[in-house]
Amino acid sequence: MTDAATQVRKADHIRICLEEDVQFRQISNGLERYRFTHCCLPELDRNNIDLTTQFLDKQLGAPILISSMTGGTEQAATINRRLAIAAQQYKIPMGVGSQRVALEKPEVADTFAVRKYAPDIPLFANLGAVQLNYNCGLEQCLRIVDILEADALILHINPLQECIQPQGDTNFHGLFDKIETVCSKLPVPVIAKEVGNGISAAMAKKLLAVGVTAIDVAGAGGTSWAMVESERAQNTMGRRLGRTFSDWGLPTAECIKSIRKVDGNVPLIASGGLRHGLDIAKSIALGANIAGLAMPFLKAAATSEIAVCELIEVLIAEITTVLFCTGNIDIEQLKRSQSLQLVQRLE
Amino acid sequence: MTDAATQVRKADHIRICLEEDVQFRQISNGLERYRFTHCCLPELDRNNIDLTTQFLDKQLGAPILISSMTGGTEQAATINRRLAIAAQQYKIPMGVGSQRVALEKPEVADTFAVRKYAPDIPLFANLGAVQLNYNCGLEQCLRIVDILEADALILHINPLQECIQPQGDTNFHGLFDKIETVCSKLPVPVIAKEVGNGISAAMAKKLLAVGVTAIDVAGAGGTSWAMVESERAQNTMGRRLGRTFSDWGLPTAECIKSIRKVDGNVPLIASGGLRHGLDIAKSIALGANIAGLAMPFLKAAATSEIAVCELIEVLIAEITTVLFCTGNIDIEQLKRSQSLQLVQRLE
Amino acid sequence: MTDAATQVRKADHIRICLEEDVQFRQISNGLERYRFTHCCLPELDRNNIDLTTQFLDKQLGAPILISSMTGGTEQAATINRRLAIAAQQYKIPMGVGSQRVALEKPEVADTFAVRKYAPDIPLFANLGAVQLNYNCGLEQCLRIVDILEADALILHINPLQECIQPQGDTNFHGLFDKIETVCSKLPVPVIAKEVGNGISAAMAKKLLAVGVTAIDVAGAGGTSWAMVESERAQNTMGRRLGRTFSDWGLPTAECIKSIRKVDGNVPLIASGGLRHGLDIAKSIALGANIAGLAMPFLKAAATSEIAVCELIEVLIAEITTVLFCTGNIDIEQLKRSQSLQLVQRLE
Amino acid sequence: MTDAATQVRKADHIRICLEEDVQFRQISNGLERYRFTHCCLPELDRNNIDLTTQFLDKQLGAPILISSMTGGTEQAATINRRLAIAAQQYKIPMGVGSQRVALEKPEVADTFAVRKYAPDIPLFANLGAVQLNYNCGLEQCLRIVDILEADALILHINPLQECIQPQGDTNFHGLFDKIETVCSKLPVPVIAKEVGNGISAAMAKKLLAVGVTAIDVAGAGGTSWAMVESERAQNTMGRRLGRTFSDWGLPTAECIKSIRKVDGNVPLIASGGLRHGLDIAKSIALGANIAGLAMPFLKAAATSEIAVCELIEVLIAEITTVLFCTGNIDIEQLKRSQSLQLVQRLE
Ligand SMILES: Cc1cc2nc3c(=O)[nH]c(=O)nc-3n(C[C@H](O)[C@H](O)[C@H](O)COP(=O)(O)O)c2cc1C
Ligand SMILES: Cc1cc2nc3c(=O)[nH]c(=O)nc-3n(C[C@H](O)[C@H](O)[C@H](O)COP(=O)(O)O)c2cc1C
Ligand SMILES: Cc1cc2nc3c(=O)[nH]c(=O)nc-3n(C[C@H](O)[C@H](O)[C@H](O)COP(=O)(O)O)c2cc1C
Ligand SMILES: Cc1cc2nc3c(=O)[nH]c(=O)nc-3n(C[C@H](O)[C@H](O)[C@H](O)COP(=O)(O)O)c2cc1C
């Protein structure tokens, strides 16, 4: 795929995500099956509730991540700037979209370079893991980390998207070895991330075994990349292929639960279909360290910097409300508490 | 919050409850999961069925409570008067809304003072438990009990509502101790009550341990205060916060069952989403002593005194029909009978 | 209730049943939970399939009953005549509606007297059991059996209907003793029948203990008499009372299964919400001897005698198709076969 | 039934299938209860994925069958030609519709004779098993195999369809013996197939015992022949009969699972309601060797040969996508893998 094509595709993605309904159709993130036990007398002052948390040795203002999305075009630069300024204000981490286009066209590298707006937060570089089979290696990884002055590199793994996308890069052979090389040589930690179909516990274990530091499950239930690529398709057959797989994957809640079960310590990011602070709080109670949202941040950033700030504020208010109404003073206590219950179907 | 603001808020609540749909959206009171076993040959004369029952040492005409709602404005005074006259007619207990405004503006105390219309029934005074952290103490509790010549004081506990409400009172620190003081010094019993998010068995035990006499679960499934406050919000973010929590809480049926399981004797009020006598009868069969309704009484009282009487009559007819068609002659027999079954999902 | 009033009520019932939707709203007859195992190679000639069966020592052309419905008015006489002629043609049994009006106004007895149209089939007389507390006794039972030259007397028991109906007869005290007297003295067998709310296994045992010969469960899931009486109500409160109880009762499938479990021999009629031959076949496979339909026969009879015949023919074709596609040659084999399975919910 | 009538009926079937909604209404093929476990890092090159498989000792390009449908008319000849040309191109097997009409009217035999368009693929002749009771025997079976130069004979068994169809052939007596004779004498293998109501494990065992080589379950969940015949009915009663049985039968997924459980080796065809390659892949993971579709191929063939090719291509792309995203390189590996999971209902 040429670099111009990459740029056009990235612009298409944003337009489709903003204009079409590309969410999973039947499968949810799985969090609706859980309910917090209400605590009517929390014995707390809500003003004392503390959302700060640690992730990859950095202090965050709240356990919220702006998921990897964009870069490479004018519009993307604007979106990234707005997101970064807001992220800096609330001290939350942020990822950028795949930087492959910046490798192909160095003159657009700047559309990713948000460190100047966000000096203090964790920033995550981004590349498709499959690109390690298509002319990318350690050198390219170093370069994109540099562009961003990134704190970590996210390698996203997206076999379904590459299958649906015309001319997708679908040679996934031998990737574990190549990921292992990158992990061992790169000066920053590597995060493995899906893009909306989820990572199983078995795959998480394999990824950790080759040196990955953290996992972002990016599970099923939110933005469906099969649906996005279906919208981009040029003919009936392409549209149908995407639709057949609109609901493919592992729901976010299941990924979190099963990965945390096999590994009590791995830094774990919940994402995929999270839409409010109640989802975030549930993810954390299920075992995630922080929780990422993509689509909601895209919509806010398409509007204004203020809209992004407002979104973060309401997420914070929602998480705080959960902590208050379950009687937990901070994120650590929420995790240890038994506040979240699987809904019992009595009938 | 100023006293004028309190009054405006109370007027808003009534208007919104009467005009908007502010019920829980996805969660029900949980009673639909239970079904009475029909008894086709009851061997009873329906005319002999007896709905009288005891609650807090008083005799009631039927196990129905008019839940705490209002006071402080002209309209509220009218509503309270209509409710009180009807309650007196059928010998059922009644609560008034939070009397905090009467403490702030003594000249409106009269809007609560319904004892003159209802000399013989149990009347329940009302205050938010959290106010014990905001300048209310034993003295204020005594005063509001006095205004009403109340038989008991309801302390309502509403952490979610206070979170959603702008400038809500959200310091719930140290409340158990203060409740204990009030319970030990007040000459009338104290009832602890939620406002629609439910009281768990664990919280009920703690409340009883500090001297509370009775529990009104006010569970999830009926009027959703998160929705009410969402309607009152001045901006998008406020509206969203309320909606995120529209379905928060413990369903009424679950609260009743679990509290009765841990304490066979506590005087227990079912409320939250009860809409007819069949709900009331189910609540009692699950373990409640009496059952309260708020929204249905508000709607009736907004119309006329006669409408309130008609509502009580149909509730009585419905409860009587349940007793008849299950072959139980009185409330005590209903409780002991095994008439209520969890619906078996055969498939 | 005066006799004129009884006549008006009966006319109302027919009009409402024909014009309004008075079926159960949420509860079904429970048969949809069962599925026949398809037998793709039945090794039968469909022409050899035999639907004849015995009931109360009489031979029937098919295990279908025209349930008790009407009498007492011109229109009722027409309906009864059409039903009787068709029943005679296919040799299936038929019940008439409550004959109380014929006791009150002997001049309308003729509207029930269908023996002249149906010399060879079992005919069932009908009276509300509760009337034994309201001036009816053995003498009256004898008289209505005589009017019809009946093969059995159905005593219907309808506590819910009497509760919803204005001025209903709701003294059900001491009825078991009175039923016992009737059973012991009457020259024909007595069948106990509900009217759409079902008979539990426990009640069936009590009824058999006092001498009842057969049980017609008339369970929940079809015509809802609470709904019918709700439509007849003169005011809001009456309408509401009926609606609250629209879905009260024990589903037909559950009644059949539980009664057959406690008594392997009692002649058992399935009815309540059966709408086609597949329902009838399922009822029989669950343990019923024959199966009754009311509403579908009312609709057909309101049209023409031919419509009733066509309905019976399609019911026969449907039952025959079930037998063929499950590889059973007759009703007895269907009963012994394990063709009916509870649907397994795999998920 | 006369031969002209047979032709008219066949033309009716095609018209109804193309124009009316004749799918099962409430019962599905059962595959939605299963979900593949997503494998985010397949370690495969998608280009190396291999869909070839063996069936009845022949090599296929993909595990897809064009199910038996038509023949006997002009339109049918066109459809069969288009299907055959496409099948040849992708090396997938194809069945033709019942050849009974070709026995009755030899001049239409040509409408079935597609071997000239498809020299290399397995072709399956077709006859209703029940015809062995209506003047068909070994000789006729040989003749229709000859017409097609068929690799196997499909005997379809359709008791429900024959019941609903006016003047259907419903003497299924003694068929096992006659099937045994055909199986033992015919030079090609015999496949037993339903037409949309499924074959149970018990029936499969009996069919194998009399010499049948392979089973095509043709289960419930797709085209409902009761619905098709209901559309063809000339009167209300006929229409109703078909509708009563619209959802009769055993879901495809259940047939596959239960038959494979009792026989690990029988060549097994999944069909009935399969609509895309994801359904096909699930069927194979559940135990089928290949999977057939009828209705989707009818719709494509009614358009053009290209439409049929496009359909096959998208099916191939879908199956390939499943293999890729579950990390399986070929059909054999998919079968052995544990990639398919019953969806756990957590709530
Ligand atoms: C417009 C857009 C572009 C995206 N681009 C990338 C990307 O380049 N790299 C990546 O790892 N994920 C990308 N994603 C996936 C998201 O990071 C996220 O995993 C996915 O959308 C699910 O989250 P959601 O349901 O909150 O949207 C993108 C998402 C969106 C909406
Ligand atoms: C207009 C209105 C005002 C209320 N005000 C109070 C109050 O002041 N104090 C209180 O304890 N509960 C208050 N409630 C809550 C009710 O007592 C009750 O717990 C809740 O509405 C759930 O019952 P429902 O579903 O029957 O409405 C109020 C309810 C309504 C509808
Ligand atoms: C118009 C009408 C009148 C009825 N009258 C009687 C009656 O007099 N006696 C009786 O035992 N049942 C009576 N029933 C009840 C039926 O016999 C039957 O039990 C009930 O309607 C449920 O069956 P269905 O769902 O097939 O209608 C009547 C039903 C209808 C529709
Ligand atoms: C128009 C049409 C004609 C059919 N004719 C036959 C037939 O002659 N012989 C046969 O075995 N099956 C026949 N079938 C049944 C199919 O082979 C298949 O078993 C059934 O339609 C279920 O598959 P589907 O849901 O993919 O349509 C026919 C199906 C269709 C749609």
Image (cartoon, coloured by chain):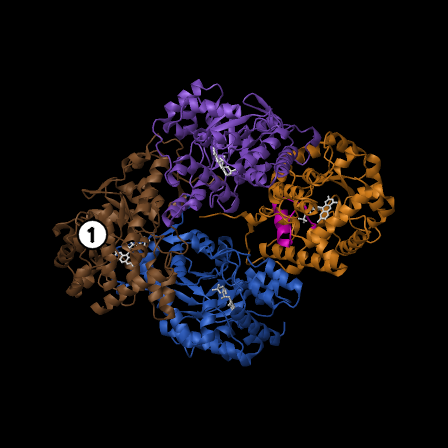
Chain colours: A purple, B orange, C blue, D brown
The picture places residue C50, in percent across and down from the top left corner, at 30, 64
Residue A266 visible: no
Residue A255: x and y, percent? 47, 33
Estimate the x, y position of residue C306 in percent, counting from the top left.
Answer: 40, 76
User: Is D96 located above or below residue A77 in the figure?
Assistant: below
Q: Is residue C38 left or right of residue D101?
A: right
Task: Relative to A320, say whether D118 is above or below.
Answer: below
**Seen from this angle, which residue lies furthest bottom?**
C107
For the question of whether residue D223 can be seen, the reply is yes
Can you give x and y, in whole percent of width and height, for residue C52 in the image? 33, 65
Q: Which residue shows up at 16% across the image and 63% down it?
A: D103
Between residue C312 and residue C102, name the one nearer to us: C312
- Chain under numbered label 1: D
**Magenta stretch, residue numbers:** B272-294
Q: Looking at numbered disc 1 in the image, what kind of residue is underneath it?
A: Phe
- Along the line of sight, the residue nearer the viewer: A192 or B61: A192
Which of the pair A88/D127 is nearer the observer? A88
Asked if C157 appears above or below D123 in the picture, the reply is below
Q: Which residue is mark 1?
A: D124
Q: Is residue D305 magenta?
A: no
The answer to whether residue D64 is left or right of residue A329 is: left
